[in-house]
Image: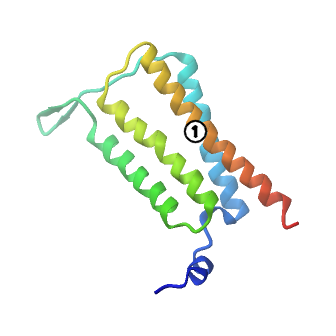
Amino acid sequence: MTDTSTAAKTNPGVLTNRKTTIGVFLLFLCFSVLSWRYVVTQKPATHHHFYFFGRHLSYDPITIFGLGFSIFVVLSIAFRSPLRVDRFIFGAAAIPFAMAIVREFAFFTGAPLLAFRLAVALVWTTVAAMCAAHLAELNRGPV
């Protein structure tokens, strides 16, 4: 049986390094700003028809597999990290990716589309705020 203390020593977590935390924070901040831009501009949701070897698909399979891979990566980090902050941040980051998959299959218009985009923007903002709070804790140093 593996000792949890040795597992924690070999895998300290993604957000233990300050440079990595800054990079992740900037990435999530960009996602937050872009999602708020989509809320404010009120662009209609476009669903491009995709033709795969002559077969008509109402969704883009490359987007679906890309979002699925993104969910797999962030949930792998969330489940395998011994650091609680990693679990919160990367677990919450999987939510907008899952919502993007739902948006690919469902056609939203009007108020439901606005509510959906608002929810995605709030989740990205919350994830960026959690990352900023952890960065502030890292900058504070040991007490």
Q: Is residue 71 above or below residue 51?
A: below
Q: Residue at x 55, y 17 (%)?
A: 41
Residue 110 pos. (x, y %): 42, 12
**Secondary structure at numbered mark 1:** helix
Residue sticking out furthest to the left = 54
Q: Quadrant of residue 62?
A: top left
Q: Residue at x 39, y 21 (%)?
A: 45
Q: Which residue is mark 1?
A: 124
Q: Is residue 99 above or below residue 118?
A: below
Q: Is residue 63 left or right of residue 140?
A: left
Q: Is residue 127 left or right of residue 69?
A: right
Q: Residue at x 48, y 39 (%)?
A: 96
Q: Quadrant of residue 109?
A: top left
Residue 132 pos. (x, y %): 72, 48
Residue 133 pos. (x, y %): 74, 49
Residue sticking out furthest to the top = 110
Q: Is residue 1 left or right of residue 142?
A: left
Q: Is residue 98 above or below residue 111?
A: below
Residue sticking out furthest to the bottom = 1
Q: How is the image coloured?
A: rainbow
Q: Is residue 44 left or right of residue 124?
A: left
Residue sticking out furthest to the front = 1
Q: Count the marks: how many?
A: 1
Q: Quadrant of the C terminus?
A: bottom right
Label 1 neighbour load within 10 Å: few <14, some 14-19, many 20+: many
- Seen from the viewer's position, the closer of residues 92 and 19 is 92
Q: Amino acid at mark 1?
A: Trp
Q: Quadrant of residue 129?
A: top right
Residue 107 pos. (x, y %): 32, 22
Q: Residue at x 58, y 75 (%)?
A: 11
